[in-house]
Image (tube, grey):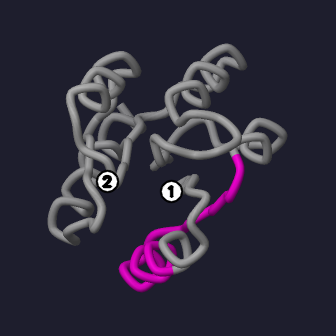
Amino acid sequence: MILVDDDFIFRQAIGRLLRSNGFGVIAFERPSDVLLSSLPRSAACLMIDVNMPEMHGVELCHALEAKGIRLPTILITGYPGQHVETYAEEVGAVALLFKPLEATELFHAIETALKQSVA
């Protein structure tokens, strides 16, 4: 699981939740750090916040794709609206989840994404 969110508290809490449920987590605060990192090409998924100050989550998805990195993506946001649904469609997101996240929805989205990652 590759988690990208500029909110430290959220990133820390979700990271703990995922790790306590057996998931490996690589967490990033800034999209630029993601772009500079060596990421797994399979058996992984992305969980990306839509609204970040440095780069929009959808822009990050496009930048990763330009580098040849296509992993199943879960978009997360605290700001629901038609525009985020459009973003999710644009990047082919497995799921669009709204903060605060519900654990059942989160784990279902991750399960779906990881199945696509190994397919």
Q: Is residue 21 visible?
A: yes
Give the residues in magenta. Answer: 13-30
Is 41 displayed left or right of 74 in the figure?
Answer: right
Query: At which x and y percent is residue 74?
Result: 36, 43
Viewer-nearest residue: 90 or 112 = 90
Q: Callout 2, which amino acid?
A: Ile
Query: At which x and y percent is residue 48?
Result: 49, 46
Question: Which quarter of the figure has residue 6?
Answer: bottom right
Which mark, by number, is residue 22?
none
Image: 35 above or below 43: above
Q: Residue at x 65, y 35 (%)?
A: 55
Query: At which x and y percent is residue 68?
Result: 66, 18
Q: Callout 1, which amino acid?
A: Met
Q: Residue at x 66, y 22 (%)?
A: 63
Question: Which quarter of the figure has residue 36?
Answer: top right
Among the two numbered marks 2 and 1 on one chain, the one whose residue lies closer to the N terminus: 1
Q: Callout 2: few (<14), some (14-19), or many (20+) C-alpha neighbours within 10 Å?
A: many
Residue 84 on the magenta segment: no
Residue found at the very far left of the displayed protein: 104
Q: Residue at x 35, y 31 (%)?
A: 119
Q: Which residue is mark 1?
A: 1
Viewer-nearest residue: 38 or 77 = 77
Q: How many marks?
A: 2
Is 113 displayed left or right of 55 in the figure?
Answer: left
Image: 74 above or below 85: below
Q: Are marks 2 and 1 in contact (CB under 8 Å)?
A: yes
Residue 19 on the magenta segment: yes
Q: Which residue is mark 2?
A: 110
Image: 72 above or below 13: above
Q: Callout 1: few (<14), some (14-19), or many (20+) C-alpha neighbours within 10 Å?
A: many
In what element is the residue under mark 2? helix
